[in-house]
């Protein structure tokens, strides 16, 4: 099942890319994400891994591991995310536009177990959650008078 969309953020491409590429920033704009830690040493790039904890159904939490499969600063970020209930593979692309940066996302979600039985529901919820996450990023970055602290990705 596929989920795709786009949003324009009123910030320069390098600022948006670096902020998004550091998964440790995501809890600032995604209220479902409780914590994120980088588990590989060194600068962020291809092969970097993160461990995260997200809010699942009925207040439970779910662990996930995110790995960057492709990293072309400041234009492309591809990742593979593994959770007990599903795998998510996808790409973020970043393009400069007059209003700032256009982010496009495209995810392929492969549910496991009982989630396979409710694929249409998972797709609808996933699409809605993605729109909310990226709207949260737009609000977060737009709410700062200056650029957010840079944790530069390489």
Image: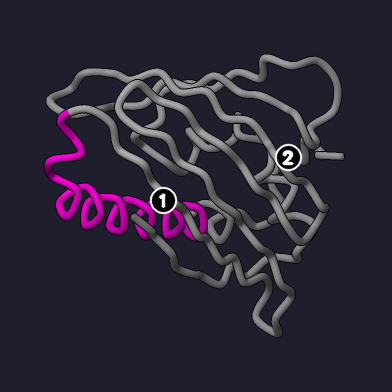
**Residue 6 x %, y %:** 49, 70
Secondary structure of the magenta portion, mostly? helix
Does residue 17 sit above or below 7 in this rendering?
A: above
* Residue for point 28% across, 31% down: 112
**Residue 113 x %, y %:** 21, 27
Residue 21 versus residue 88: which sits nearer the camera?
88
Between disc 1 and disc 2, whose residue precedes?
1
- The magenta span reads 114-139
Q: Which residue is mark 1?
A: 133
Quarter of the image where the C terminus is located: top right
Q: Which mark is residue 153?
A: none
Separation (CA) of disc 1 from disc 2: 19 Å
Q: Give the number of the mark in front: 1 or 2.
A: 1
Q: Which residue is mark 2?
A: 149
Quadrant position of residue 33:
top left
**Viewed as shown, does residue 13 lie left or right of 142?**
right
Q: Secondary structure at mark 2?
A: loop
């Amino acid at each position: 099942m596929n989920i795709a969309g786009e949003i324009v953020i009123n910030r320069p491409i390098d600022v948006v890319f670096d902020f998004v590429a550091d998964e440790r920033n995501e809890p600032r704009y995604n209220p479902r994400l409780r914590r994120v830690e980088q588990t590989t040493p060194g600068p962020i790039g291809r092969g970097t891994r993160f461990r995260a904890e997200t809010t699942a159904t009925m207040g439970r939490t779910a662990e996930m591991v995110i790995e960057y499969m492709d990293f072309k600063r400041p234009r492309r970020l591809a990742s593979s995310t593994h959770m007990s209930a599903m795998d998510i593979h996808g790409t973020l692309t970043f393009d400069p536009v007059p209003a700032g940066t256009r982010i496009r996302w495209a995810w392929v979600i492969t549910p496991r177990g009982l989630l396979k039985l409710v694929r249409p529901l998972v797709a609808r919820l996933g699409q809605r959650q993605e729109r909310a996450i990226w709207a949260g990023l737009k609000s977060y970055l737009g709410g700062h008078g200056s650029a957010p602290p840079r944790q530069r990705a390489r």
